[in-house]
Image: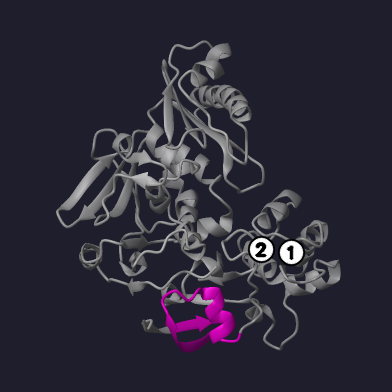
Amino acid sequence: MKPAPFDYRRPATLAEAVAALAGEPNAKVLAGGQSLVPLLSMRLAAPAMLVDINGIPGLDAIEVVTDDGVGGVRVGALARHAAVLASPEVRRVQPLVSLALANVAHATIRNRGTTVGSIVHADAAAEMPVVLSLLAGSLDVEGPGGRRTIPASELYLGPLESSVGHDEIAVSAYFPALAPGAGVAFEEIARRHGDYALVGAAALVDGDSVRVGYLSVSDVPTVVDLSGVADDDLGEAALAQLDPAADIHASAAYRAQLVRVLTGRVVRSARAFAEEGT
Amino acid sequence: MTEELHDVRLTVNGHTHEIRVPARRLLSDALRHDLRLTGTHVGCEHGVCGACTVLVDGAPTRACLMFAVSAVDTEITTVEGLTNPDGSLGPVQQAFKECHGLQCGFCTPGFLTTITAGLRDNPTPTHEEARDMIAGNLCRCTGYQNIVKAVERAAELS
């Protein structure tokens, strides 16, 4: 239960961090470490180098963006889940981020873990990759060739695999604002409070558009379009586009039942949000 | 292979310590082995049980999910730092004693640090909030009822 040896760099600037990554193909970025350190301790991963970005100033910003037409919130790579969850601006501009963050692990983990780290860890059982996907947000990464923006739709390639290059560092995630009159909801079912969800669902209702994102159902975050589906048929319509898997935590049939139940709940709840504005 | 060692300055309970450790030294191990502050307990060592919880800049944090080299520039508080300046029990410790909030005591340091920070942020928790405050910590002896009582008693004492 101790990590294998690794080289350690603690750069003071983003440029130094990118240079360190470029020099070692088997390096990993350390931000909050709440997913990475257990993997190291269990020796499921043994990178040759960790590039600790915690000493880089300015990466913890949480900013409201208003100059891109749509508006949204931009969350820096060192913004801890707890800080994002506590931000009144985030809750006002895109409440789904706050609703989902309250379900991310326990408060103690949220104090150290970062929202961007959770997004690039690309765990299909995690909340924030689904939220970014459902909202059609994006991720800014910096590498030797400069900065580029990856749309959420191009971010997730497979289990724990994202399209962020090994020589790139995620610097911020962008969550588009909730449109006026639109509604959101989030709910998940876990065996134990704070544990990984057996199934989770996030809904975004905007006029006739109804979309729901799922965690722990597929091996990547999955979003389905349920626009025009009658209320009583939501669960079955979602399942027609999903293929819930079995594992030691739940059978495929039980996951399918959770999809049926949660889909109806989050869509109803998002509609109520849209009507009441909260 | 000789493993590279790093000079790390840790500030723990108001005291500064200089240690020389490999980068992979977990903060929990640095506290226990290098600083001999064995009040911080190590249970699951992958962030689930909460026994190793310490305060990093006041926020409850799993010491087993941080490297000591990453803890520079932070103020760490361990269970040893929760006593009153005269050495008597702090309010959360006193409440655990009064309410029988511990049996074997293994999980207790993590509860004490977590609740100390929880009551700082919310000095008058409801019963539900008291339960929620300790939701990230496991105890295998007590069944939690007396720990919840201790949270409420500590709120009175604080």
Q: Name the residue beneath numbered marker 1.
A: B155
Is residue B108 something that shows in the picture?
Answer: yes
Indicate whether A191 appears above or below A30.
above
Task: State the residue at coordinates (82%, 73%).
Answer: B97
Can you see residue A91?
no
Image quadrant assignment for residue B28:
bottom right
Residue B136 screen position, x and y as percent: 64, 56
Coloring scheme of the render? one colour
Q: What stretch is highlighted in magenta?
A: B9-36
Q: Do the residues labelled 1 and 2 touch (CB within 8 Å)?
A: yes
Quarter of the N terminus of chain A within the rendering: bottom right
Residue A99 as seen in the image, left or right of residue A146: right
Numbered mark located on residue B119 in the image? 2
Query: Could you tell me which residue is drawn at 41 percent across and 73 percent down?
Result: A5
SS type, badge 1: helix
Amino acid at circle 2: Leu
Tell me what residue is drawn at x 73 percent, y 71 percent.
B106
Task: Please name the amino acid that badge 1 sits on.
Answer: Ala
